[in-house]
Image: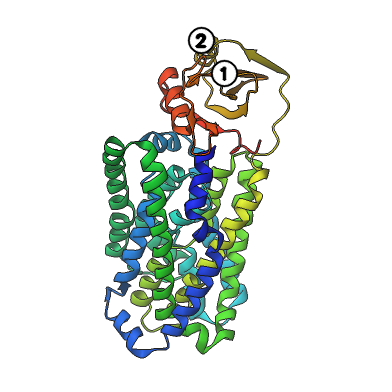
Amino acid sequence: MEPKKEKKAILGVFEKYLTLWIALFIVTGLLLGRVPEFRNSLKSLEVAQQSIPIGICLFFMMYPTVVGIRFSDVKSAVKKPKPLLLTIIANWVIAPAIMTLYANLMLKGNQDYIIGVILLGMSPCTAMVMWWIMLAKGELAQGLVNTAVNAMLMILLYAPMSAFYIGVSGISVPWELIAISVIFFIALPVSLGALSRRLLISRKGEEWFKETYLATVRRISIIALLLTLIVMFSLKGDVILSDPLLVAFIAAPNLLHYVTMIAMTYSISWLANWNYETSIVTTLIGSSSHFEVAIAVATTAFPDRPGAALATVIGPLMEVPLMLSLTKFGLWTKRYFPRKERIMAKVVHVKTWDEFKHLVTIHQPNTIAYTLQRAPLSNPPIGLRLVFASKDVQYVFLDVAEGKCLKRTRIPVAINSIGEFYLEEEDIKNFLRTELKRTSLSIISMEALGY
């Protein structure tokens, strides 16, 4: 498990103080927004009311989140329809209805603000949410699948559902904006990520890619987020400074909507006994908003209602601290996922790899869990435990080191700079998928399962 520790050491300065960095850059953005020359120069860098600097920063936030995703991970995620189904129901059935209810109850008599708040509730995030998934250590492949599906559904459902809940007809959907979002924040980063992953691993090796390249680009993604905050709060932050009480009034239904959606999706995921990585993805996507689309629709479809645009602007100013809080809450509650499974009636210890492989072929489990453990009697003193369950039986196979590899599976044993032995996660997964001839097999660390 040493590689993970090394990665934390590289990113520690950013991760450990990320909350402080975000707070400082929000304040910096608010202060710079009071400088007319700076604010006007940022406004001049807009196309179709969308900020070019924010778009560039969002791209550099997206690319690091997808470059580490393997195609086999995406295929595995596609074969898990239940989390995707919950995301769709949360974003397109529950969220719009709840936001409409809260807006009408809490903003009664203020139709402009109600329209803006409802527009925010109609637009699930398809860009920045991937960065929050990475920060929360969620399953990035599942997040990519869910956001891609949401982007397609937005094209089909955004206009008719907005018209239905707001009670007007003829709402025009910003097709160009959605298309640009899909191309630049999903298609392009995914394509470049897959290409660069393949080229870099073939030339530099997987260890260099994981420990050096990924660490570097993910540092860049944090810098991109901080620059996004400066631009966002410079352009829109004057709303907070000019009338904080009005901001609090409009923010109330937004905040209650976030809390409701987070509580609902996270609880359902826990009750469904999903692992943390899947649960946090569903929760983040189910509670976030695509504020660029909401702002564009409010401005173009309701030009005579400035309050609608104002309400949509408040959304992104709230979302960053809220999503940061959710990632921290997720990491803190990770140990509770999945729920305690019922005790197996029988545990079978399998003695040989061939027998374990044969049992996997017979029972066809969807998941195999693994954990590394100390093996004092082996040389070096490290072992690998593999586990899968079928009905009321849990099958366990243990392999120990012998020289430079494991005795039965021949998985290589690595050693770090301070003389500690470990197994590469990718070596374990590649061995199992190759030997068992099942590329879609879910291979999960016991630590990820909370053990």
Q: Quadrant of the C terminus?
A: top right
- Crowdedness near tag 1: few (<14), some (14–19) or many (≥20) residues, C-alpha within 10 Å: many
Is 224 placed left or right of 114 in the picture? left
- The disc label shown at residue 227, or none: none
Specify whether residue 375 is in view. Answer: yes
Specify whether residue 149 is in view. Answer: no
Residue name at image x 62 percent, y 75 percent: 106
* Residue 337 position within the rendered picture, expressed as x and y whole percent measured from the top left: 64, 42
* Residue corresponding to mark 2: 354
* Residue 365 position within the rendered picture, expressed as x and y whole percent measured from the top left: 54, 22
* Residue corresponding to mark 1: 399
* Residue 388 position within the rendered picture, expressed as x and y whole percent measured from the top left: 59, 23
- Crowdedness near tag 2: few (<14), some (14–19) or many (≥20) residues, C-alpha within 10 Å: few
Element on which disc 2 rests: helix
Q: Which label sits in the foreground, 1 or 2?
A: 1
Q: Is residue 190 above or below residue 228?
A: above
Is 73 placed left or right of 105 in the picture? left
Q: In which quadrant of the rendered view does residue 439 lie? A: top left
Is 37 placed left or right of 275 in the picture? left
Q: Nearer the viewer, residue 290 or 371?
A: 371
Identify the mark nearer the N-term, 1 or 2.
2
Q: Nearer the viewer, residue 262 or 185?
A: 185
Q: Quadrant of the N terminus?
A: top right
Which amino acid does the dot numbered 2 rest on? Asp
**What separation in Å lies between label 1 and label 2 (alpha carbons)?**
12 Å
Element on which disc 1 rests: strand
